[in-house]
Image (cartoon, grey):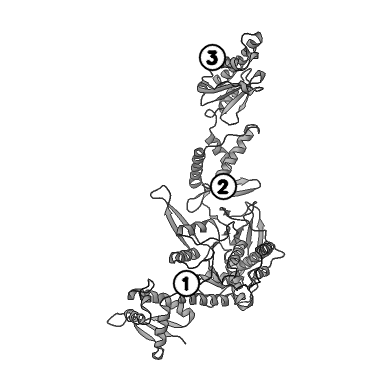
Amino acid sequence: MTEGLPRFERDAEGSGVIFFLQDEVRVSIRGNTETRATTQLWRADDPSTMTPTYIGNILSESFRERLTKAAAEKFGEDYNPDTEGGRERLATLKLGLDNISIAFARGAEQDTGRAVREFLSVRGPSRPMLLLKYASVAEYFHDADQEAFATVPQDLHKETWAVKSRSFNRWLRYRFYIEEKQRLGGVHEPAPLRNSLVADVLTQLAAKAQFEGVQRPVNLRVAEAGGNIYLDLCDKKWRVVEISPEGWALKPAGEGPVKFTREKGMAALPLPDRESASLEPLQTLLNLQGAEGERSYRLILAWLVQALRSSGPYPILVLLGERGSAKSTAARILRSLLDPSTVSLRTMPRSPHDLYIDAVSSWIVSLDNIGSLPHWLSDMLCMLSTGGGFSTRTLFTDRDQELFSAMRPAILNGISDVATRDDLVQRSLIVQLPTIERGGYRPEREIHAELRSARPKILGALLNAAATGLMEVPFVELDAVPRMADFAKWATATEAALGAQAGDFMDAYRVSESEGARQALEAEVLSDPIYTLAENNSENGGWSGTATEMLRQLVGLVDEDVTRSREWPKAPNALSRRLRRLAALYREVGTVHIEELQRGAGSGVKKWRIAKVG
């Protein structure tokens, strides 16, 4: 160790060294090398004595002489070279500077010199290297889309974030802050990290996650593994509920085989109540009474337990009702039970991109106050129900794509018939909410207070039903399998645990399917003329002919403005496509039978037959 070397420590900004000389003199040295060091001196008891900044070679005798002369000019009468005391103090100061120089000069040979050099920004570990070192405590991996993730230790639990997320960026910065502050003795705070430096480190960590990390699925709110269901409570402790055929249990953070990540706006679920688990408060909150209310209640419960599955298909819950039927309140209540959010309801999206951004940022998609659905949104909701994706070009690239893939539970609410296209109708649960009579409204604050008290009980009951479903679903056999067969089997497996009798769900589901078909037919421009054509020929057993002949007949049954509309088929092949879609709707309603006949011998012309039923 160099004899007489002053005590030193890193400065507050973390980019240099401060030496403590005699008589409270301080020397600050910064720079890439000791041969071009930025140096400044001052007396700790008088900040006004700070010398100008000098840049030079601390190993140079002339540079140290220059620093000593600057101190003589700034430090006052005590350092006057014309007095004996001043000359002694300046000599002591010069000796301190010489010892600093010796430490740098012999740094490669002695531990103290190496320690001094490590305090300088380039000679010691660089900030990027330190940041990578501090980030190594995380577990890095990627998903099937090669998206990089990190699981980081946080207090007494672990959290998982996308490497490119703001949350991981902040964790990385805070990790550096804590480690560097501790290294500086806990007194001085390190200087902030430059954005470009952090961006470079994040890029390297993402590469590490992709090429060195294992591939693991990452989930949002709900996951399944090993035959069990996992529900992320999204609380501060990152606790998870594990649902198995034997029941459900609360798991501490970090335990279990699944990884959860969180998006902005996701709110916490309450701790489920096992002892007081009950669904009765939900029926009261939704004001569902009578036979119609009971059918709606069964469909809503089936939708809720399906939303606990990590894979669909998911039926779309369509809440209809007159103005004043509390449709928006009902949608908020239902979403709060499984996927609460700081923004529980969304307006109608303006593009497929907006819809899928909502879908990948939350578990349940809830669209409020829908008047009518444009065709593109109806198609996108069908894809969201049974699976689909959306792609767009990555910003600032020519070929890279951002892929959005999601299958999500969804809620729609509106006054008029929202689901009118047949493909969306077949994926929907139609629920008619009762109108609240004048004087029967309740204050929002009162409803929220009741909901806050009921949510743990309702969640406990839904978890009980899901556990029963896992045990019973392998043994469920349906007499008439509907289109959404997986959903129907799961709902049937859970209906007893939800307080229903055997068959109650399928009865309610059939009513919903019939109501949806009626809504779709009412919105179809061909519906009335086809029914009229069938009725006019009922005595003959129906009407049959080619699509060309049928189109000519139908034109004569409607006004001219109808045939000029965009919805009216302009060619026989377009009519044939529409007839194939309408056949299923009429079959569900049971009013008209549409049949595509075999091609006639010789001519090969395809014919259709329509007949009134009953």
Return the residue found at the far bottom: 539
Cα separation between marks 1 and 3:
90 Å
Other-residue count near label 2 (Cα within 10 Å), few / some / many at <14 / 14–19 / ≥20: some
* Residue marked by disc 3: 61
Amino acid tagged 3: Glu
Residue 89: % across, % down: 64, 13
Q: Is residue 355 left or right of residue 469?
A: left
Vertical position of residue 100 compared to residue 310: above or below: above
How packed mark 1 is, by other alpha carbons closer than 10 Å (few <14, some 14-19, many 20 or more), is many
* Foreground of the two, 277 or 140: 277
Residue drawn at x 51%, y 19% is 57
Residue under pointer 2: 167
The residue to which callout 1 is attached is 420
Q: Is residue 478 visible?
A: no
Q: Quadrant of residue 447?
A: bottom right
User: Callout 3: few (<14), some (14-19), or many (20+) C-alpha neighbours within 10 Å?
Assistant: some
Q: Disc 2 versus disc 3: distance between alpha carbons?
A: 51 Å
Label 1 – label 2 distance at C-alpha = 42 Å
Q: Mark 1: which amino acid?
A: Thr
| Quadrant occupied by the N terminus | top right
Q: Nearer the viewer, residue 402 or 341?
A: 341
Which residue does the image show at 66% across and 70% down from the upper left?
Answer: 284
Local SS, label 2: helix
Res 603 seen here: yes
- Disc 2 residue type (three-letter): Ser
